[in-house]
Amino acid sequence: MTVIDKIAPEGSKAGERVSPRPTFRHRLSRWDVKVSPYLYIAPFFIVFGIVGLFPLLYTAYVSLFKWKAGDDTPDFIGIDNYKDLFADSQFWNALTNTISIFLLSSVPQMIMAVMLAALLGARLKGATGWRVGILLPYAASLVAIGIIFANLFGPKYGLINGVLQTIGLDPVDWQANRFSSHVAIAIMVNWRWTGYNALIVLAAMQAIPKELHEAALIDGAGMWRRFFSVTLPLLRPTLVFIIITTTIGGLQIFTEPKLFDALPGSNNGGSSNQFQTVTLYLYQSAFENSSLGYASAIAWVLFVIIVVIALANYFLTSRLTRTPAVKKK
Amino acid sequence: MRALIPVNKVVEHVRTIRNGLVLALGITMTALGASACSGGGDNNPPAAAAPNEHVDLTLSTFTEFGYEALIPEYERLHPNIKITHNKTGQGGPYHQEVITKLAAGSGLADVMALEEGHLSDFLDKGSKFNDLTKIGPADVTPDRWLGWKYDAAKTKDGKLIGYGTDVGPLAMCYRKDLFKNAGLPDDPEAVKPLFATWDSYFAAGADYVKKSGGKAWFDSASQNFNAMVNQLPQGYISTDDKLAVETNQGIKDAWTKVTDAVAKGESAKLTAFSNEWNTGFQQSAFATKVCPAWMLGVVKEHAGAENANKWAVTAAFPGGGGNWGGSYLTVPTQSKHPKEAAELAAWLTAPEQQIKAFQAKGTFPSQVKALTDPALLSKTDDYFGGAKVGELFAEQAKKVQKPQYKGPGDGQIQENAASPALQAVEQGKPAAEAWQQLVDAAKKITR
């Protein structure tokens, strides 16, 4: 240290030119500027590497083996798991179910969330109370919701069929029929998430400048016209964001169909897999059939599907948010 | 303000993707990462501890084994041994965890309880369990247990991986009042001919449906089907570990009988152990029920006090006898003290202790001597009209034939292929289509 200190001043004449051999202290401070930020963010990436990236890559590795839980020497089979998977009707069935439940839940959810937000934005007595109220389902335990709804939709002794029969309609075997089981599960999802999304939309709605509404009002726009021509277009980025999050959540739907089964907790998704989702099938393959290699292949295909949809959403978002600016003038 | 929300949320959405992956993949990896380091090495049981050296033993059970009072007693008898007892509520997750920890090569207790229905998955992994005929006390001989109970815990190469604890001998439960209303005999002796064979049982069912104006005879098709398949000489998997669903005529015959009965309206179409099934007991939705010894408690709980004395149980079961449930105590090779663990398992499964467990929690003993114990024989149940249930189930336990070979995947096929297929029939799927569903699902499980 002392040696360096002595040499350093000789080389640099009062800072006129940069020393060809910077001092240790200089180097330290340069490293500090260059390296420290990476060090500060490193903990996240190290943890992510261990619990995120490593499992991701290792799953890809496992998916190339016929690997039963407890196998000491799994057989390398290349992409056979993927070949089997693409020829597996149960997988396509599960994917169809997942997308069907997703559409049945996200589309009505979006519409209801916007409507609820519009209502909550109106002048109400006790506004905070109402707003907290619609968030309550979100605060309830998912498992509790699942068990309660499975009871409500019980084919013989469920409350909903009881009501249907009281008003003279035929009871519905919610678990047996493919479509009605999707509707029931979608209702469960909507009940939990609509209020949450409505609050996000409400916040975005309140951020719309009053001047725009006033200007529209002066131009003679009625309530509906203002809603469709002012409010909705300005909500677009928020709505796209909600679409992205519900897509990701919807493609991984697991707890609701698992608890909706006649035997709550079963991974079969109904007697003929009529509401088995991709994640349920993945779980069943891994932990009931102990086919870890096959389950890993499902996990990877699901990952790719989510990435593709997320990317599609990303491009959609950037296009949608850009268009208004271009249209201006 | 508006700009803030999406930014926050984008971060959250990125997190959601990651969480999702970690969830979906991470769980898988936990199991895999663990299995990677399980490659051999710990298969040599260390030598037994010196006679008075302090030994810590762990014991894992699920639901109720009735061992609470027995453990302090064992510790008193063996001052150098300290036992930690881990109790888990549900059997399903418990056994799943055992499989994971077996694969991981660590984490299991010295003495692990395993249930009969899950045993096929473990017999297949016999190398991970100690052979109790080798490390167990010499005075524990096969004649301690009912023959079929003892034999069912032997692997194909003859290793004994578990000492039997309790059993679930099958009898028939039925509703006296509903039988009477439909003009059927209702005395426990008089109903026995109805329950002589499966044919007579389903014929009586068809008769009951007609006379009762369309009421259901049994709760769920799979409850009967499982018992029927268990009575066959061979099950879903043949002794050479090949899938036999399509080649075993007995299975197809049982399928035809059960689905015919469903077509005649004999099934209440309630999935066993579902919420609707629980309610079905209260609503008097069915008149008969396959009844292993432990089912009496289930009936009581769900049918409730208002149906006391309406249910009865009789010492008859279609096609002879059968067993559903009951457990074993095993000593995995992971155990650091296999010899002490085997001694504890041997002591707990001795007739004297199993009688105490029976008195504590009603677990029905599998030991020959326990089945003639006065404490068992004198046991009656007021809910079932004061029936001598101890004597009755002891009699049923002796009717069980030799155990059927349960190949790997057997339990899975029953649970995830046969039961859903029968449920589909009850939900209106044509029986032929549902049979194909069973076959396909079974092929997949054994793939």
Image: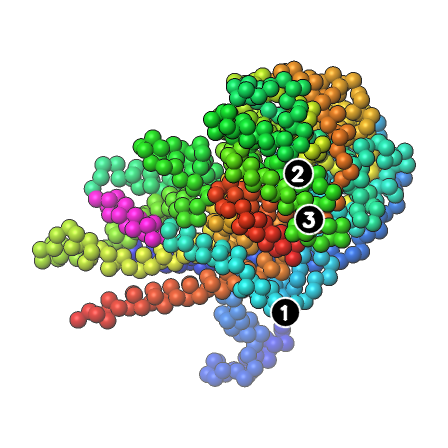
Name which residue lies at 60% across and 52% down: B439
| Tag 3 residue | B248
Q: Are marks 3 and 1 in contact (CB under 8 Å)?
A: no
For the residue pair B276 and B20, the one nearer the viewer reads as B276
For the residue pair A145 and B281, the one nearer the viewer reads as B281
For the residue pair A136 and B62, the one nearer the viewer reads as B62
Horizontal placement of B290 versus B306: left or right?
A: right
Q: Which residues are magenta?
A: A106-122
Name which residue lies at 60% across and 19% down: B185
Q: CA distance from mark 2 to mark 1?
A: 42 Å
Badge 1 element: loop
Asked where in the image residue A153 lies, by quadrant, the reply is top left
Q: CA distance from mark 3 to mark 1?
A: 35 Å
**Amino acid of disc 3:** Asn
Task: Examine the rendered structure and indicate whether residue A303 appears above or below residue B310.
Answer: below
Q: Circle 1 marks a residue in which chain?
A: A
Badge 3 element: loop
Q: In front of the other: label 3 or label 1?
A: 3
Q: Circle 2 marks a residue in which chain?
A: B
Which label is found at residue A78? 1
| Tag 2 residue | B228
Q: Are marks 2 and 3 on the same chain?
A: yes
Task: Examine the rendered structure and indicate whether residue B291 appears above or below residue B150.
Answer: above
Q: Circle 3 marks a residue in which chain?
A: B
Q: CA distance from mark 2 to mark 3?
A: 13 Å
Q: Is residue A317 magenta?
A: no
* Colour convention of the picture: rainbow
